[in-house]
Image: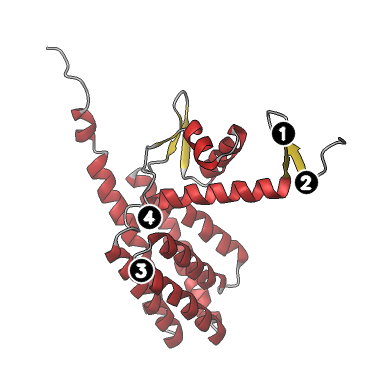
């Protein structure tokens, strides 16, 4: 057999993998793990064991390591010496910093969206929000997460600044593990659903103060829920209680 084509590469064991199909498979695995983190199926500080992931996804070790490396670049996973990979647990200070930047970026984009708003964009947002409504009514957090991403992607794309949209998505991904403390709660999904309609109405009314206030409040619910839960689960008092007594 001749040399592998440009669409193929060889893994550590010498197997030939078609580049495009391998990339699609890798993208799917990263997406599934990303959703597992967002939806709280994988918890902060939970280990991601390579052998378990190999068995789950039926892939080779190098593919698992590449998926973990991508998740690490997204800020969702950290790899520790002699301990392997685990879901990243952001500190309250880190969460505050991330959400401060998100607030600046998203309110700036929202103002620009309002300035450029069209009837077509309002119709598009309304269509997407009806999908989010249905996922909320069905109590389906996975579908709600996906439809929420599509709603916000369409909304922020309306600002006309590709670099700003990219920055918003980057910091949105950093917040994925933060959302895990609220996104599966039905009251949170219902609040999010209602706030999306307030955003649409504010765009129709060209009400900038209402739009900005809603966008700011919209993201801070997940921030506050994460910080409260983090302090409850990882407080110094709790950590000290797990230490062995010191001899007198």
Q: x and y percent of residue 24 in the render?
A: 64, 51
Image quarter hosting the C terminus? top left
Mark 2 nearby-residue class (10 Å; few <14, some 14–19, many ≥20): few
Q: Based on the displayed image, in which of its 4 quarters is residue 144 positioned?
A: bottom left
Looking at the image, which is closer to me, 71 or 41? 41
Give how far across and how far down residue 220 sits, in percent: 34, 61
Q: Quote the CA–CA distance across marks 4 and 3.
A: 19 Å
Q: Which residue is mark 2?
A: 7
Query: Label 2 near label 4: C-beta < 8 Å?
Result: no
The Cα atoms of the two marked residues, 3 and 1, are separated by 43 Å
Choose the circle earlier in sequence order: 3 or 1. Answer: 1
- Residue 135 visible somewhere in the drawing: yes
Closest to the camera, between mark 4 and mark 3, is 3
Residue drawn 52% across the image and 59% down it: 169
Residue annotated with mark 1: 15
Horizontal relation, residue 77 to residue 67: left or right: left
Secondary structure beneath label 2: loop
- Label 3 Cα crowd, 10 Å radius (few <14 / some 14-19 / many 20+): few
User: In which quadrant will I find the N terminus?
Assistant: top right
According to the picture, the residue beneath numbered tag 3 turns out to be 138
Q: Is residue 193 above or below residue 94?
A: below
Q: Residues within 10 Å of mark 4 (few under 14, many from 20)?
A: many
What separation in Å lies between label 1 and label 2 (alpha carbons)?
14 Å
Q: Position of residue 22 (x, y in %)?
A: 67, 45
- Quick one: label 4 or label 2, which is nearer the N terminus? 2
Pick whichever, 122 or 133, lies toward us. Answer: 133
Q: Which residue is mark 4?
A: 179
SS for dot 3: loop
| Mark 2 and mark 3: Cα distance apart in space | 42 Å
Tell me the crowding category of disc 1: few under 14, some 14 to 19, or many 20 or more residues within 10 angstroms, Cα based. Answer: few
Dot 4: element: helix
């Amino acid at each position: 057999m001749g040399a592998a084509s440009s669409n193929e590469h060889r893994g550590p064991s010498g197997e030939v993998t078609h580049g495009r199909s391998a990339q699609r498979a890798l993208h799917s695995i990263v997406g599934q793990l990303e959703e597992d983190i967002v939806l709280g199926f994988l918890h902060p500080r939970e280990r991601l064991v390579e052998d378990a992931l190999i068995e789950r996804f039926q892939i080779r070790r190098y593919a698992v390591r590449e998926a973990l490396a991508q998740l690490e670049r997204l800020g969702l996973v950290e790899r520790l010496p002699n301990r392997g990979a685990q879901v990243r647990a952001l500190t309250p200070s880190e969460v505050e910093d991330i959400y401060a930047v998100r607030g600046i970026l998203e309110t700036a984009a929202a103002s620009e969206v309002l300035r450029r708003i069209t009837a077509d964009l309002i119709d598009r947002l309304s269509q997407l929000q009806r999908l989010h409504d249905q996922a909320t009514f069905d109590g389906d957090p996975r579908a709600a997460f996906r439809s929420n991403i599509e709603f916000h992607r369409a909304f922020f794309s309306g600002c006309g600044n590709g670099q700003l949209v990219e920055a918003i998505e980057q910091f949105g991904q950093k917040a994925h593990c933060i959302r895990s403390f609220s996104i599966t709660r039905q009251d949170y999904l219902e609040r999010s659903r209602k706030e999306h309609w307030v955003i649409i109405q504010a765009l129709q009314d060209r009400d900038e103060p209402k739009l900005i206030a809603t966008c700011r409040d919209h993201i801070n619910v997940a921030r506050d829920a994460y910080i409260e839960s983090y302090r409850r689960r990882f407080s110094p008092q709790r950590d000290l209680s797990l230490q062995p007594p010191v001899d007198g």
